[in-house]
Amino acid sequence: KAGVTQTPRYLIKTRGQQVTLSCSPISGHRSVSWYQQTPGQGLQFLFEYFSETQRNKGNFPGRFSGRQFSNSRSEMNVSTLELGDSALYLCASSLPQDPPSTHGYTFGSGTRLTVV
Amino acid sequence: GENVEQHPSTLSVQEGDSAVIKCTYSDSASNYFPWYKQELGKGPQLIIDIRSNVGEKKDQRIAVTLNKTAKHFSLHITETQPEDSAVYFCAASIVQAGTALIFGKGTTLSVSS
């Protein structure tokens, strides 16, 4: 079956701009989580969506937001981009269990965002 | 806040040797501990996980042990192969935060033949 699909794979944006990243989860998975990965901070939880509702949120500023559609696809948006937002943004889908199911998260390959 | 420490940050072994990566977590309420393998240009891939009611779990050459009292867990890879070379991350569930995980900083494992 198809995995988690993230688009685009690469993005270059200028400081002050905004960006939208997209994620299509595995069919049947209803929970979508987003993580930021940087060399310095590692993998950090951004937020989780389930049934079009944000269920949990990490410790990131309000410039980071997201949403989920009725087909479970999710988007995240970063407004007023800063140089420090350069990172690999990973989307992960899972069955809506707490904690994650036996199969845990399935991550996409990520979107590499570079802010110049 | 919650924290997961992972050691070592780099590990080099010869093919056929064993590799051990250790993690400690701060929140005693964490109850789910997965390990992920990340290869260059790819997202992390779940390789094994363990829940707090289990002390050890094995899957072929990979095993994970959990010591709840000491709040640490370890990944053991036996008979390492060059294709095991990757970055490995441990993680712990964040209590009262749905499926959210807190990750260690990663271990870069290099297996030379």
Image (tube, coloured by chain):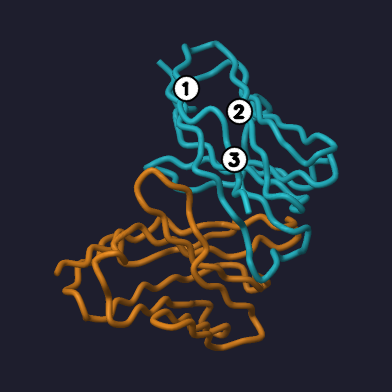
Chain colours: A cyan, B orange
Does the residue at mark 1 contact the one at mark 2 (Cβ under 8 Å)?
A: yes
Which quadrant is home to the N terminus of chain B? bottom right
Report the chain holding disc 2. Answer: A
Query: At numbered mark 2, what does the secondary structure look like: helix, strand or loop?
Result: strand
* Residue A90 percent across, percent down from the top left: 54, 42
Tell which circle, 1 or 2, labels the residue nearer the N-terminal end.
Answer: 1
Amino acid at dot 2:
Leu
How far apart are the alpha carbons under marks 1 and 2?
Answer: 9 Å
Judge from the rendering whether residue B2 lies leftward or rightward of residue A116; answer left or right.
right
Q: Mark 3 points at which residue?
A: A5
* Residue B54 percent across, percent down from the top left: 61, 87
* Residue B35 percent across, percent down from the top left: 49, 67
Q: Name the residue under label 1.
A: A11
Tell which circle, 1 or 3, labels the residue nearer the N-terminal end.
Answer: 3
Going 76% across and 60% down the picture, which residue do you hit?
Answer: B96
Question: Which is nearer the eye, B80 or B33?
Answer: B80
B11, above or below A67, in the image: below
Q: Mark 2 points at which residue?
A: A21
Within 10 Å of disc 2 (Cα), the crowding (few <14, some 14-19, many 20+) is many
Amino acid at dot 1:
Leu
Judge from the rendering whether residue A106 lies leftward or rightward of residue A27; answer left or right.
left
Q: Is disc 3 in the same subunit as disc 2? A: yes
Going 39% across and 81% down the picture, which residue do you hit?
Answer: B61
